[in-house]
């Protein structure tokens, strides 16, 4: 029997760098609505829910026929938020689509889900990556992987260090993450880790506790709306985006 797949989209209004960004308008829709509609275009996903403590976000989603799950308020990150409601999806593969990714490609979701389901190493978590310039902003998370795509480290620092040979491009973390149900439940029980608190990268908690975390290279463009400059770029990019015409 084909495994069911659910997209859980964590969202909140209290963003540190761009407050209220989930409801910022791009081409007539709030950012969170774009994100959810794109997840709904995925061929691999059976159900889509926005997970939030915000009544304003819930109302915005209802306006556009997007299902929501009301969560508690105090979570350290989006993974904790979706883990808090994941018991409803025990037999599913769970896709964490970050709520600030209005230009997420449904093709990226499909490819990452397919990679996770067919991976012989039984990953607990899969993170897609794409190439970016070595000198890119520290808001981007860099991913170092082994030859079998097992993730060795995540960092905002310029790694690997240009010591003996120079590096022009590195892999960056793309915010569409797949979890096995057991993997997400394992993460839920873990306390914030040392490197996680230093780098402010939530999935370092999984790496520090020896979870099976893998990467998967993609080519589709993607970027998170973290600061106002990102928001302005997203508004321009949306005007030429092929998936925008499908919802």
Image (cartoon, rainbow, N blue to C red):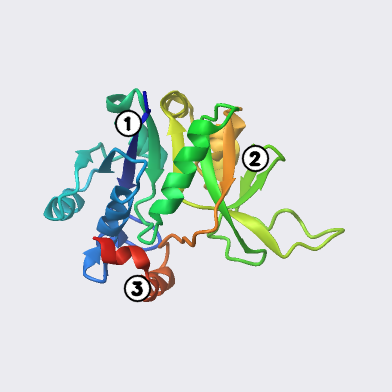
Q: Is residue 65 visible?
A: yes
Q: CA distance from mark 2 to mark 1?
A: 28 Å
Q: Earlier in the sequence, mark 3 or mark 1?
A: 1
Left/right placement of residue 48 relative to residue 130 reads left
Question: Residue 232: image x %, image y %?
Answer: 38, 74
Question: Residue 161: image x %, image y %?
Answer: 76, 56
Rendered view: 189 above or below 201: above
Q: CA distance from mark 2 to mark 3?
A: 33 Å
Rendered view: 78 above or below 30: above
Residue sitting farthest toward the front: 1
Q: Earlier in the sequence, mark 2 or mark 1?
A: 1
Q: Quadrant of residue 170?
A: bottom right
Q: Earlier in the sequence, mark 2 or mark 3?
A: 2
**Which-is-in-front pick, marks 2 and 1?**
2
CB under 8 Å between discs 2 and 1: no
Residue 149: give its label: 2
Question: Residue 198: image x %, image y %?
Answer: 58, 45
CB under 8 Å between discs 2 and 3: no
Q: Look at 34% across and 63% down and name the residue there.
A: 243
Left/right placement of residue 140 relative to residue 45 reads right
**Which-is-in-front pick, marks 2 and 3?**
2
The secondary element bearing badge 3 is classed as helix
- The residue singled out by tag 1 in the image is 84
Q: Look at 57% across and 28% down and name the residue there.
A: 211
Question: Residue 212: image x %, image y %?
Answer: 58, 30
- The residue singled out by tag 3 in the image is 235
Q: CA distance from mark 3 to mark 1?
A: 32 Å
């Amino acid at each position: 029997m084909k495994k069911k797949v659910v997209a859980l989209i964590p969202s909140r209004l209290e963003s540190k760098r761009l407050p209220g960004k989930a409801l910022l308008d791009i081409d007539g829709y709030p950012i969170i609505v774009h994100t959810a509609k794109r997840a709904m275009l995925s061929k691999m996903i059976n159900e889509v829910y926005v997970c939030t403590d915000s009544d304003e976000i819930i109302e915005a989603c209802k306006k556009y026929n997007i299902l929501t799950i009301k969560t508690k308020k105090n979570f350290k990150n989006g993974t904790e938020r979706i883990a808090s409601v994941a018991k409803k999806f025990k037999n599913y593969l769970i896709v964490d689509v970050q709520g600030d990714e209005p230009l997420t490609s449904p093709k990226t979701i499909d490819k990452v889900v397919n990679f996770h389901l067919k991976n012989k190493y039984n990953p607990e978590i899969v993170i897609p990556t794409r190439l970016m310039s070595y000198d890119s902003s520290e808001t981007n998370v860099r991913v170092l992987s082994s030859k079998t795509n097992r993730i060795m480290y995540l960092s905002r620092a310029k790694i690997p260090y240009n010591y003996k040979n120079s590096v022009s491009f590195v892999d960056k973390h793309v915010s569409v993450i797949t979890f096995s149900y057991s993997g997400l439940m394992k993460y839920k029980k873990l306390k914030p880790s040392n490197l996680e608190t230093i780098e402010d990268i939530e999935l370092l908690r999984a790496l520090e506790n020896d979870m099976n975390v893998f990467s998967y290279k993609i080519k589709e463009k993607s970027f998170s709306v973290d600061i106002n400059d990102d928001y302005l770029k997203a508004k321009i990019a949306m005007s030429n985006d092929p998936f925008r015409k499908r919802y």
